[in-house]
Amino acid sequence: MQNDSKQDKRIYTLSEEKPAKAVIALGVPLIMGMFIMVLYNLVDTYFISLMGDDYKLAAVNLAYPIMMISVAVSNMIGAGASSLIARCLGAGQKGRAEQTLTAGFVLTVIDSAVIAVTGLAFLPQVVKLLGAKESTFAYTEDYVMILLIGSLFTMGSYTISALLRSEGSVRLSIVGMIAGTIANIGLDPLFIFTFGLGVKGAAAATVIGNGVSLGISLYFYLSGKTMLKPRARFIRLQKETAGEIFRVGIPATLETLLTSAAYIINNNLAVAYGELTVTAVGIAQKIMTLGNYIYQGFASGTQPIMGYNYGAKNYKRMLSVLRSGVMVVSMTELAVMIAYGTLAPLLIGIFSKTPEVVETGAKALRAIMCILPFVGATSMSRMSFQAMGKPKHAFTITLIRQLILYIPLQLLLNHIFGFSGMIWAQPMTEVIMMCVSLLLLYKVIRREAANGTDSQ
């Protein structure tokens, strides 16, 4: 009975709770968990900074796209499966939801093995592509190698967390995140200093932390604390289910992969101004992860609500959730932006005492922080399209944002205005994208409501 009561509460939040309250109920716990996950990057950065070598800091920043690529593939599986699970629950198809859940587990194992084997086979070429030069190459190679070896832990942690959120079990999803981060924090100084592993130790601590997170999330499924369970009879992939996961998930992956490409381009442009500039920009971007996780948390929290109500054909509630969600995320991010602008030199100074790094990093942070009041609406729109099972629309947002606007603006403004132009390309992109994405989503929901029957 107690488990049934928990399930009823989850369904009530998805289907009937006041929109703003539902967005906050699912978003805030996720943001808290993601805030803890910010420490994954910041703790590594902090402990490596204690080694007094800014080139090691630069190496960790250069290796970051590898983590993003792993997350991108995880996001493909997690977003695709989560969208289908939420729609199935909204339509009352629990068996199909469990089949999708099991497929998500299987695909994660397969894809992580492919990434690890491919990356390790071409490791030197990968490191060179990331923008590493003579002074950072060896450190970057060490870090990337261990991340690739631990691909299953990293990808599994992200995917299973997304699957938990798809059924409304947000609090369960963040427990694993928190435990993994605590493990990472404890292992970083042990591996880096006590065992003398340096950059390798930081990477190992990150991988093991993700392994702890994955293990705890799996425990919740196997111990019956979730609404859905993976079933042995569904281990053999069904073509229709896998196809739907990829159909919805690929645009989500392209978003992260194109973000990784933009990040690599950004690092290669920054190298032209000196490798310490890479360090400065990397620190600013790591600090920005707090603001990024806030809008990602609200968007991810909104996704199961939108998917459930789309499955139930409750379009009126979808529009209400969208309006409330955009207002909540924009106001929250505006407050974060003001804090960043005020404290920028102090925040950069935590990770480096080199005056050039502090000055350049503060300048970069004060530019890229301007995305925050706008980017949440774009992320929420894209996640809503994924929840609705409309990958073409999600891909349209991705295509316009990264390939048509951001990457060309990076190259053009860097050519015309130098470093200042490079760092202001992203804020310009996000202002335009907020308008484009919200108009597109509003139009699609209104059209669906006109063509279908709104249940409310």
Image (tube, rainbow, N blue to C red):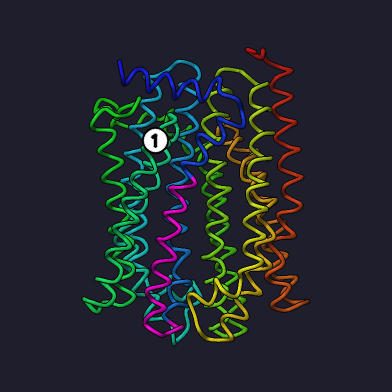
Q: Report the number of numbered marks.
A: 1
The image quarter in which residue 85 lies: top left
Asked whether, in this view, residue 89 is left or right of residue 191, the answer is right
Q: Secondary structure at mark 1?
A: helix
Q: Quadrant of residue 388?
A: top right
Please state if 230 lies on the left or on the right of 277 as rendered.
left
Residue 270: % across, % down: 60, 77
Instruction: Locate the C terminus and report the quarter of the image it occupies.
Output: top right
Badge 1 amino acid: Leu
Q: Residue furthest left?
A: 195
Residue 180 lies, in percent from the top left, at 32, 53
Name the chief secondary structure element in magenta.
helix
In the rendered image, the quadrant that contains the N terminus is top left
In this rendering, the answer to whether 155 lies above or below 222 is below
The percent position of residue 76, horizontal first and vertical second, equals 47, 44
Q: Nearer the viewer, residue 78 or 126?
A: 78
**Residue position for label 1:** 164
Label 1 crowding class (10 Å Cα cut-off): few <14, some 14-19, many 20+? many
Is residue 347 part of the magenta span, yes or no? no
- The residue depicted at 30 percent of the width and 73 percent of the height is 200
Q: State yes or no: residue 40 in magenta.
A: yes
User: Foreground residue, 114 or 342?
Assistant: 342
Question: Residue 46's spot in the image, x, y percent?
Answer: 42, 72
Per the rendered image, the range of residues in magenta is: 31-55
